Image: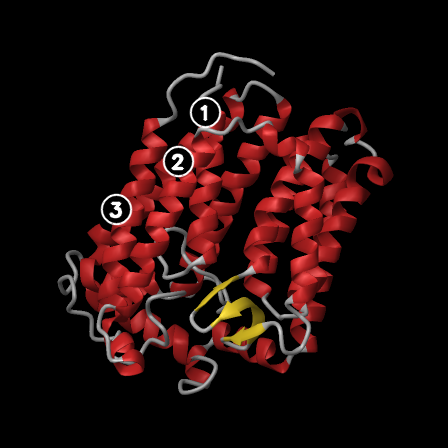
Amino acid sequence: MVQHRSNPDWIVIIATLFLLGIGVVMVYSASAVWAYREFGDWYFYAKRQFLFAVLGIISMYLMMNIDYWVWKKWAKIGLLTFFFLLVIVLIPGIGVTRGGATSWLGVGSFGIQPSEFMKLGMIIYLAKMFSERQKQMGSFTKGLLPPLAILGLAFGLIMMQPDLGTGAVLVGTVILMIYTAGARIKHLVSLMLVGVIGFIGLVLAAPYRIKRIIAFLDPWQDPLGAGYQLIQSLYAIGPGGLMGLGLGMSRQKHLYVPEPHTDFIFSILAEELGFIGGTTVLLLFLILLWRGFRIAITAPDLFGSFLAVGIIGMIAIQVIINIGVVTGLFPVTGITLPLLSSGGSSLTLTLTSIGILLNISRYSR
């Protein structure tokens, strides 16, 4: 495929860099107390976030300049590699446990999270599959069943860690791609019913998930246990008001909100920067999502279109779940806010994915 390459979507680049900059500042503000308590260094998490931000920007720049259809050739090998890593991380003595989930490979505070790589690998592989099987998408056995089987295997391995948050993002992204590819509505409705039954089964299979559901409905039933995170999150958001308490002036980051620089960073942002700060971040995400779906619509081929839908859908679903959790709209689950939360694999993979999206924008019609 040879086409004229134009400039990338600068609005996507600007929105991404603004969110990334806000994220580095907020990681320092939210994590300083925890970093000093754990490592004796106020800047520990901030320096780590800045390092991965730089690595992510380099990766984004490289991906922006590598023709996206190259990944179509490596889709199968990439998916098999990430499946292998998901299996390896479950082997006792190899996988590293953090926050109750054995989902890391690495040493000390540095490592990779194979489930994050699986999200991008799955998107690339399914974009290739759907672009080559358009006429079969109306069939359940030939169009819908193969991607569901692959998704089921990946989701099962992720749940063995267990990591419900990442699994939910993966499932949501794949369902969005299946819908975009032209699956029949009746098949998707049936799939949603099966998914609801499966979700209920997952909740009933783990007592701590039942406690999270109860805490979601009424966190004050267990304010020092299952409801603690949500209550402290709301205590942070509420006092923020219109303008916030001021950057660095959060009270809840002083060992009240657990690990405020990761899953609950938006709570601290809302407390310090108020309604205006929180709304600004949400508007930047909306701009990013709008331009991303526009890139998907104007992509020069089906592979590029499905790839863009998967990437921007993954980011959108993760943002919706994270914001929903910290504001009490969804039950608490471990999932980071893209580009803002402290993280290595998550931040780097998000920027890498945006780099691929930018390359697709260079060939848009």
Image-based side of 173 in relation to 145, left or right: left
Label 1 is placed on what type of residue? Ser
Measure the alpha-carbon separation of dots 1 and 2: 13 Å
Which residue lies under the disc numbered 3? 280
- In the image, farthest residue toward the front: 107
Query: Do residues under tags 2 and 3 come within 8 Å of each other at their CB atoms?
Result: no
Asked which secondary structure carries label 2, the reply is helix
What's the residue type where badge 3 is placed? Thr
In 3D space, how far apart are the residues under numbered discs 1 and 3 (Cα atoms)? 25 Å
* Disc 1 secondary structure class: helix
Residue that carries the numbered disc 1 in the rendered image = 361
Circle number at residue 3: none
Q: What residue is rendered at 83% in x and 39% in y?
A: 140
Q: Mark 3: which secondary structure?
A: helix
Nearest to N terminus: mark 2 or mark 3:
2
Tell me if mark 2 has few (under 14), some (14-19) or many (20+) residues whose alpha carbon lies within 10 angstroms of its own: some
Percent of width and height locating residue 329:
45, 62
- Nearest to viewer (mark 2 / mark 3): 2
Question: Which one is in front in this view, the residue at disc 1 or the one at disc 2?
Answer: 2
**Can residue 158 be spotted in the picture?**
yes
Asked whether residue 178 is in view, the answer is no
Q: Please give the residue where the numbered disc 2 appears in the rendered image.
A: 61
Q: Amino acid at mark 2?
A: Tyr
**Mark 1 or mark 3, which has the lower sequence index?**
3
